[in-house]
Amino acid sequence: MGGLALALRAPLLVAALPGVGNSDEPLNVSVGVRIASIGTLDAHSYRYPGLLYEVIAGVAAVFRAVGLHVSAHGAMRIENLGVAHTDSRALMVAIRLVGMAASLATCLLVWAAVRGVLKSHGLAERWGRIAATLAASTVAVSPLATANGAYATPDVYAGFAVALTLYGTTRVVRDARYGEIVCGFGVGLALGAKYLAAAVLPVLVAYLLSPGRRKELIKVAGIAAAVFVVTTPGVLMHPAAVLAGVEAEASHYQTGHVGAEGNAPAFYVSALFHDQPLLLDATGVAAVAVFRTNGLIRRTLIVAFAYAIPQFLLLATMTVRFDRNLVPLTPALAILAGIALPAVFPRRHRRVIAAITVTAAFLPLASSARLYPRLDEHSRIEAAAWVTQHIPRHEPVAVESYGPWLDPNRYHLVPLTFAADRPTVQARALILTQHAAGRFLDDPARHPEQAAAYRELMSRYRLAARFTAGSWIEVYVPR
């Protein structure tokens, strides 16, 4: 299971480099490298808490300590949203390596949580190992978990923190040692990774279901607070800035993000079904199992639901929705699946159920195995080569978000978040992208004004080249 997860994620560490097409990675890396360069504890940016920035700063500091050059400017040169370039591929790979390790550790924690509960429950050794392995495999082969495990973004760390927290709660309900320490670290990291306050709920429920250990909650709170402060020292040094960052991100999710808004509940259910359908089905089985089981199995299911339900409801009430927000949710669903399926179905049907479950669990494997060409975005390289070959130097070139990286010393670049915002733009070449123009052109009924603006643009420009090795990119020239 761990080897499979590693095999799927390792190639993605170098995808697209030296280009960086993820919308969050460039800013995250810039903040972390700046922290390392200045030697400050103040990130000056708190839309995310500090764990990710500290990881990046730590990697940059190690590079410099061993004599490797890390340029504060060249580590990440940002041209536009989703258009960036790095002069230090090794630094980017090293930063992504830490995220990949967190992704692998998430799989192992899911395995350990399920294995521990089923063993304490008395399930046969063989079936317990199979159930734990399948639960971990759902995360290992998840396309969302795989892709986000190779980005310098907080989601992979949030997923690890949730898995650590839930593993700690299983130790609490099993009355095993060190549950309070694991829970404290898990909650602190969840807050330090992505302000995941919902991670507190399963811990509270676990201790409510374990009356003899409730006094440990004070220790859990102390550890969690200490870990949060260590990962995000700004909460003490600059509390107003941290609060402003949280409010800004909350406002962003509530007010809207063009092309990523509306009908969040259906969006997340659909995204989960396409990512790992077994988890969606198993969640329904787990809901039934809460009423059909008792003892340790029931307590564990209740604890996992204590995170999964509030977190999903929080996501579902937001105007803005991104599928990456499911990454911190999948460990809880995987644990629900691993615990509920072997507990609910009669022993005589276990072989059949195991065969069906194995098949369902590995359905997303093909999608995960094909991630590299999609994340490598070779269409950007092709588009950049076309522009270099056909457009004279020093001419104005307008580039939408998520477009190709072009040499700023060669062309007069006109960055456009969305070309529809400037329908009168004048350029020798206009580059439209699937991630920008496509979100409007694919749904003109929802975005009539933007679609009309693009039609106006296309009346003045003609399509000169189109590239589809990844998301599509179109190059237009004046008619």
Image (cartoon, rainbow, N blue to C red):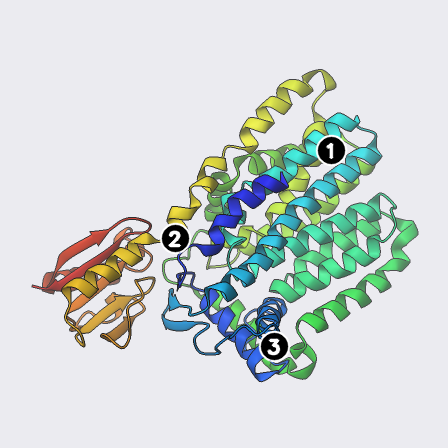
- Of tags 1 and 3, which is closer to the observer? 3
Residue 290 x/y as whole percent: 73, 36
> At x 52% / y 48%, what residue is drawn?
9
Whole-number angstrom distance, CA of label 1 to CA of label 3: 42 Å
Along the polypeptide, which appears first: circle 3 or circle 2?
Answer: 3
Q: Residue furthest top?
A: 348
The crowding category of the residue bearing disc 3, from other C-alpha atoms within 10 Å (few below 14, some 14 to 19, many at least 20), is: many
Q: Kindly identify which residue carries mark 2.
A: 376
> Seen in the image, is 99 located left or right of residue 453?
right
Residue 211 x/y as whole percent: 90, 50
Whole-number angstrom distance, CA of label 3 to CA of label 2: 34 Å
Residue 362 x/y as whole percent: 54, 33
Along the polypeptide, which appears first: circle 1 or circle 3?
Answer: 3
State the residue in front, 403 or 272.
Answer: 403
Secondary structure of the residue carrying numbered label 2: helix
Residue type at numbered disc 2: Asp
Residue 258 visible? The answer is yes
The crowding category of the residue bearing disc 1, from other C-alpha atoms within 10 Å (few below 14, some 14 to 19, many at least 20), is: few
Q: Residue furthest front?
A: 67
> At x 76% / y 70%, what residue is drawn?
226
Q: Which labelled disc corresponds to residue 291?
A: 1
Residue 446 visible? The answer is no
Q: Kindly identify which residue carries mark 3.
A: 242
- Give the answer, above or below, for where 100 lies relative to 19: above
Q: Quadrant of the C terminus?
A: bottom left
- Of tags 1 and 2, which is closer to the observer? 2
